Image: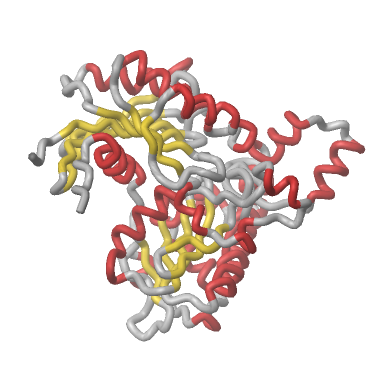
């Protein structure tokens, strides 16, 4: 029986909350409504709802504009649309630890395990756990599924996963986990059987990372123990010389909480520019603001440097894919990152890049460059349907 189910997909980012309703069965998915609360904790917080061809936007204020209150605001708006009660809900969970390789049905033990992982992802896990709890209150008895961003990277070899610290720390879980795995998984699904052997996917949004994928498996990635590592992001520092933390602790008396605020909330594009954390604003003002120009230049330089390192890990690259907000909508950033990659066979087509085409490279480019919009919400819905409702394979 190919029975349709209504799946609720919840995706909590560092500055946004997304909720989508899908009808899902074995033949595919149909999006019923999508809600996105973004720019949370700022004066520009807003909620966008898309249903069919109708789109509405309203400003959020007070508790509705906070990370803690936005999901309740979304549920309140969706209640007015007369949607059916969902049959299951799926959640993007940023950190699953070292032993989770696939989506799992949520139970009390899993929530306890996630609570223990909060120090590894303090920007995300508390809100994601809160989202599970709010969904439980709103839909008692609803089966829920956790989809882990880290699961995609559990194929990394130890040489890439290890930090150069004592082995006891590695066994305690201090290792490279990698994130944005649901996004990478979706891109690989889009590429399908046509995917070449050596791929670098650049997920460039408020949080940004890259992954090196060989024969469909992640072999390395830029983020590390937590989503703070890698190259600079909107408000996150990316990789830092560890001596900086030691220096600040000794000379400035910074404690762990102050350091965490510094590297997660006050650094990156915001820290360098001193004015804005979003790439669009910085691109708009870089001609007249040297600090904005430097922030953009540093982002592109660091991204290009990390891309080159992943190409070395792969032994070359056949395809580069840009995705997420900056990767999908900022041709100036893509161009700057790709400049100087001629040794990898990258030749960008200016017109294709400016028009945000699917194929961004020239027909003769040895390494192809594409722009593929990601869809984490759809991937969550698929995983949830398969975990709860897909028929088990028959024993042979």
Which quarter shows the N terminus? top left
Of the pair 396 and 281, the residue shown nearer to us: 396
The correct choice, above or below, for 297 with respect to 100 in the image is below
| Residue 14 visible in image | yes
User: Residue at point 82% right, 32% down?
Assistant: 254
Q: Residue farthest to the front?
A: 396
Can you give x and y, in whole percent of width and height, for residue 265 in the image? 64, 36
The colour style of the image is secondary structure
Snapshot quadrant of residue 286: bottom right
Q: Along the horizontal axis of the image, is 221 left or right of 139?
A: right
Q: Residue at x 53, y 30 (%)?
A: 114
Measuring from the top left, give residue 133's x and y in whole percent: 42, 19
Q: Give the answer, above or below, for where 70 lies relative to 329.
A: above
**Residue at the spot 58% in from the left edge and 71% down from the top edge:** 313
Q: Is residue 43 visible?
A: no
The spot of residue 44 in percent (x, y) is: 46, 30
């Amino acid at each position: 029986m190919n029975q349709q189910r209504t799946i609720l997909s919840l995706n909590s980012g560092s500055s946004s909350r997304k909720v989508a309703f899908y009808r899902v069965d074995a033949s595919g998915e149909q999006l019923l409504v999508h809600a996105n609360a973004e720019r949370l904790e700022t004066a520009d917080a807003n909620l966008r709802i898309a249903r069919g061809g109708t789109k509405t936007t309203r400003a959020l204020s007070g508790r509705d504009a906070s990370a803690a209150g936005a999901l309740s605001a979304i549920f309140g708006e969706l209640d007015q649309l007369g949607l059916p009660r969902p049959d299951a809900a799926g959640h993007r969970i940023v950190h699953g630890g070292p032993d989770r390789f696939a989506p799992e049905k949520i139970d009390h033990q899993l929530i306890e395990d996630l609570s223990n992982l909060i120090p590894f992802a303090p920007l995300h896990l508390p809100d994601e756990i809160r989202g599970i709890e709010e969904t439980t209150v709103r839909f008692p008895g609803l089966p829920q599924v956790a989809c882990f961003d880290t699961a995609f990277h559990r194929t990394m070899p130890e040489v890439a996963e290890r930090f150069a610290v004592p082995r006891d720390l590695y066994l305690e879980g201090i290792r490279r986990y990698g994130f944005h795995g649901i996004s990478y998984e979706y891109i690989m699904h889009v590429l399908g059987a046509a995917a070449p052997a050596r791929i670098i996917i650049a997920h460039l949004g408020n949080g940004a990372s890259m992954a090196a994928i060989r024969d469909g498996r992640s072999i390395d990635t830029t983020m590390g123990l937590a989503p703070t590592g890698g190259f600079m992001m909107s408000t996150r520092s990316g990789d830092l010389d560890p001596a900086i933390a030691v220096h600040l602790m000794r000379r400035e008396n910074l404690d762990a909480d102050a350091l965490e605020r510094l590297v997660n909330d006050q650094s990156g594009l915001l820290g360098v520019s001193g004015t804005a954390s979003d790439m669009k604003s910085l691109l708009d003002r870089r001609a007249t603001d040297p600090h904005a120009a430097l922030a953009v230049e540093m982002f592109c330089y660091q991204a290009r440097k990390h891309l080159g390192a992943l190409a070395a890990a792969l032994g070359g690259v056949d395809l580069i894919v840009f995705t997420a907000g900056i990767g999908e909508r900022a041709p100036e950033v893509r161009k700057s990152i790709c400049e100087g990659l001629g040794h990898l066979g990258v030749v960008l087509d200016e017109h294709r890049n400016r028009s945000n085409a699917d194929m961004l490279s020239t027909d003769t480019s040895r390494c192809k460059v594409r722009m593929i919009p990601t869809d984490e919400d759809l991937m969550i819905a698929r995983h949830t349907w398969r975990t709860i409702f897909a028929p088990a394979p028959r024993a042979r």
